[in-house]
Image: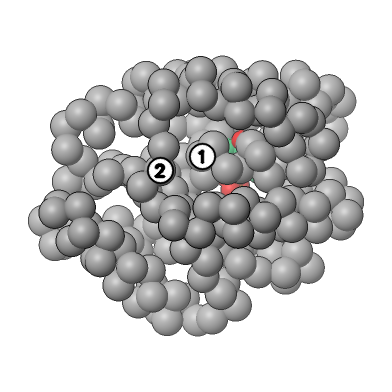
Amino acid sequence: MLITFEGIEGSGKTTQIELLSDYLARKGYGVVKTREPGGTRFGEALREVLLRPGLDVDPLSELLVVMAMRAQHVEEVILPALQDGKVVLCDRFVDATYAYQGYGRKIDLGVIETLNRLVTKGIRPNLTILMNVTAERGLKRKAAASAIDRIEAEDMSFHQRVKKGYEKLAKEDPKRFFVVDGSLKVEAIHEIVRTKVGNILKSYGV
Ligand code: TMP
């Protein structure tokens, strides 16, 4: 079972993954919590370069780095965990590339799809939770919490395109996507998320 969390910067998805992971572990599920960019030693090293402020990065280079990291992540972490019957909770996955490099950087979505198919070996999330907040609110939350990285430092129109991109992806695949209002209180969101995940696990007989 692969459950991914997506959303723009500062949408609160990382907090929700922590809460869901603890909840599922308490219920006795084998949980693997991971993230992109990152998730492996190689991927975490690439993440540092990808997000380093001040670097001038060509969009296609950025796309290929993200895909290199994903290939390693799928092979080293996600596939083995799924084969082991674990519930994998991943902070960003394939959809982030459509949203950021596709809608944000305007790279052809077909190219992204081809590369995603190659590096994921056909793995698709069973459920994708999209945390929906406005770009202004997300960036404000992020800026208050930590130093701004290279992608967060993009202008507001970039973040608006990413947000619209996510909304489009969710509309195109309503069976897989579950959109949550990220402006609600943390505990309220957790309750909504854990009810949804509980139902999905039940429907898969897990
Ligand atoms: P995070 O702060 O949620 O961990 O995400 C780090 C950044 O990586 C975020 O700005 C989005 C970006 N990213 C992409 O641009 N493309 C991708 O495919 C992924 C997974 C992340």
Q: Amino acid at mark 1?
A: Phe
For ligand 1, the image quadrant comes to: top right
Q: Residue at x 17, y 38 (%)?
A: 85
Q: Are marks 1 and 2 in contact (CB under 8 Å)?
A: yes
**Mark 2 nearby-residue class (10 Å; few <14, some 14–19, many ≥20):** some
39 to 64, vertically: above or below: below
Which residue is label 1 attached to?
93
Confirm whether residue 39 shows in the render.
yes
Which residue is label 2 attached to?
125
Q: Position of residue 56 (x, y in %)?
A: 86, 25
Q: Position of residue 23 (x, y in %)?
A: 24, 64
Is ligand 1 less than 8 Å from the beta carbon at label 1?
Answer: yes
75 to 8, vertically: above or below: above
**Mark 1 nearby-residue class (10 Å; few <14, some 14–19, many ≥20):** many
Q: Residue at x 43, y 63 (%)?
A: 16
Tell whether 113 sits left or right of 35.
Answer: right
Q: Which one is nearer the viewer's eye here, 129 or 23?
A: 129
